[in-house]
Amino acid sequence: MPIKAVFTAIVGCVLEAGSLALLLQDGRGAADIGLYLLLHLASSALFALALTLLMPQRYRHPRKWVRAYLLVFNFFMPLAGLLCTVVALTVGILWPKDEAADHFDTTDSPEFVTMRRREGSGFRGNRVRAQLSNLSTPLDERLNALVAIQNTPTHSSGDSLRSLLADPADDMRLLAYGILDAKEKRITQRIVDIRTHLGSVTDPDTSALLHQQVAELYQELIYQNLVQGDLLKYSCDQMREHARASLAINSEQPGLEFMLVRLELMSGNAQAAAAALQNAYEHGFSRTRLLPYLAELSYIERDFEQVRRLFIEMAFDPSVSSTPQLHRYWRHGRRTYATHPDIAPRGPA
């Protein structure tokens, strides 16, 4: 293709040179001018063809109109048109236009479901839960559904698993109990190992880190709904104890303070939650992330004006179905500042 383009361009140059020589000679007549225009038209057509062959593929379409434009451009702008076209072509090759399609790929659309999924495989979580709760479903299908959710977070699948502990089918009961027990034992064993290591540590920084890890593991037991009753109370006490032990060594841990915020709010300890919120904020934790917990604390304290003010300030995620409704409920009414003045924003609401 380049050889053909070069040959075409050379022939066009020869014709253009001949036309110019004819135009510059003495004693020009109408026949000479007509012959010049004919030779110049032929050279312009050859230049248009050569330039089209040298163009990148994406610039050649629509082919007929591109060639027609180059022909007219070179015909009415002798030499200058050719020079401008070569410069434009060089720029187009060295710095190609950034196509938006180059940054994207296509993929299949996900299957739409009307309910928010909680557990299961992919977008079939609701079907899995329906199979688990429907006693008329064949046992094999229910067992397959139970196996499908065994690796999902227990925080979302715990209710379904615990409801199966009273299932009339022995296989379902045993498998559900085994899944819950295995997850609890996995975390408990890590707690035991770290505690054993903690007893032999003398370095303060290492001790603070191990206390933090134990607190996080107890939080995992609580968050995944793996402990209930007295075990839940014991896990809360242990999480609180180890978190405070770590903070006593290194107070610059806003993440641990945030863990205590969630724990105290869950336990209904408003005073301890307020102190943890204040400590987390003072040590650099994002106030934006603290807003929902400030609102929850204000609600526990029955300070509904503060709840309203915080919801007005709070951004919400429309993809979470309950948040827009809560936001609309609380945003109406008088905007005032109430409690927690240290972490309230400065200036008018």
Image (tube, rainbow, N blue to C red):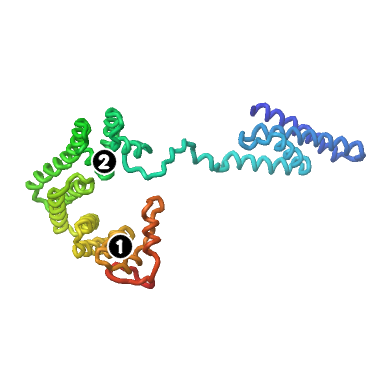
The crowding category of the residue bearing disc 2, from other C-alpha atoms within 10 Å (few below 14, some 14 to 19, many at least 20), is some
The quadrant in which residue 50 appears is top right
Query: Who's the residue at 75% across and 40% down the image?
Result: 74
Nearest the camera: 71 or 288? 288
Q: Residue at x 81, y 38 (%)?
A: 20
Q: Which residue is label 2 attached to?
A: 160
Question: In the rendered image of this protein, does residue 334 appear above or below residue 123?
Answer: below
Sequence-wise first label, 2 or 1: 2
Q: In the rendering, at what x and y percent does residue 82 appear?
A: 71, 40
Residue tagged by mark 1? 295
Camera-side residue of 145 and 287: 145
Task: State left or right for residue 118 relative to residue 113.
Answer: left
Label 1, secondary structure: give it: helix
**Secondary structure at numbered mark 2:** helix
Expressed as whole percent of the image width and height from the top left, the position of residue 152 reads 28, 39
Q: Quadrant of the C terminus?
A: bottom left
Residue 31 seen anywhere in this rendered image of the structure: yes
Residue pictured at 84% horizontal, 37% vertical: 37
In the picture, the disc for residue 57 is: none
